[in-house]
Amino acid sequence: ETGVTQTPRHLVMGMTNKKSLKCEQHLGHNAMYWYKQSAKKPLELMFVYNFKEQTENNSVPSRFSPECPNSSHLFLHLHTLQPEDSALYLCASSQEGAVEQYFGPGTRLTVT
Amino acid sequence: AQSVTQLGSHVSVSEGALVLLRCNYSSSVPPYLFWYVQYPNQGLQLLLKYTTGATLVKGINGFEAEFKKSETSFHLTKPSAHMSDAAEYFCAVSDAGGSNYKLTFGKGTLLTVNP
């Protein structure tokens, strides 16, 4: 695997389910990000992790719970979501001090 | 606070025609600027970036952008459109805070290329 990978690519879940999204970066970076991409809206930064420590939480509801066990892996745990949470969730990574971020292909989430 | 405005949510050009996608930004500090492209069912791919130095920046796939501080613009151009350029394009500005550069994105411009 190369770059940034995300699994699953598609997920349909009910409002009472619990699921997790996984992101893995193979670039040796030390910062990882979760973004939400909704139709007709700009990408929204959700969380930032730097060297496994959360450095940014952009007022995200507690039904989204991130986890970063090491610099290569990032999870987004989901529970009791709402239909408006349906979106494309993108993971990205970057090297400390570098300006560019590298994105994964995203997980298309549908909440029914 | 930083912001990005992309003029035109949808641009349609003929194959071989000039591509011009507009981006204006606001920033309280000297900005770092980016263009990303997103093909259907894929993530974002970096096309080009401006940090410092030369204001005309060349990227992949024949795209280039010019940073104009006086106009607070960073428009993306390509002299001759190809069918494979059909995608959504996002302009972004960075917020150089600490050791991470947080990106603020525009809403995107969908480029359609007609044969």
Image (cartoon, coloured by chain):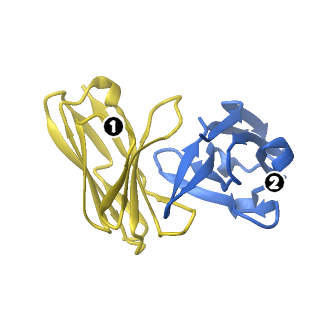
Chain colours: A yellow, B blue
> In this picture, is B12 found above or below A48?
above
Q: Nearer the viewer, residue A76 or A57?
A: A57
Q: Is residue A48 visible?
A: yes
Q: Is residue B114 visible?
A: no
Q: Quadrant of residue B62?
A: bottom right
Residue A71 in the image, given as x and y percentages of width and height: 32, 68
What residue would you read off at disc 1? Answer: A60
Q: Residues within 10 Å of mark 1 (few under 14, many from 20)?
A: few
In the rendered image, the quadrant that contains the C terminus of chain A is top left
Q: Nearer the viewer, residue A63 or B26?
A: B26
Q: Nearer the viewer, residue A11 or B84?
A: A11
Local secondary structure at mark 2: strand
Give the residue type at disc 2.
Answer: Glu
In the rendered image, the quadrant that contains the N terminus of chain A is bottom left
Local secondary structure at mark 1: loop
Q: Residue at x 32, y 68 (%)?
A: A72
Judge from the rendering whether residue A79 lies leftward or rightward of residue B42; answer left or right: left
Same-subunit check for callouts 2 and 1: no
> In this picture, is A5 found above or below A109?
below
Judge from the rendering whether residue A89 lies leftward or rightward of residue B40; answer left or right: left
Q: Which mark is residue B115?
A: none
Q: Chain of mark 1?
A: A
Judge from the rendering whether residue A11 lies leftward or rightward of residue B25; answer left or right: left
Q: Residues within 10 Å of mark 2 (few under 14, many from 20)?
A: some
- Dot 2 and dot 1 residues touching (CB under 8 Å): no
What residue would you read off at disc 2? Answer: B66
Residue A84 in the image, given as x and y percentages of width and height: 34, 25
Residue B25 in the image, given as x and y percentages of width and height: 70, 41
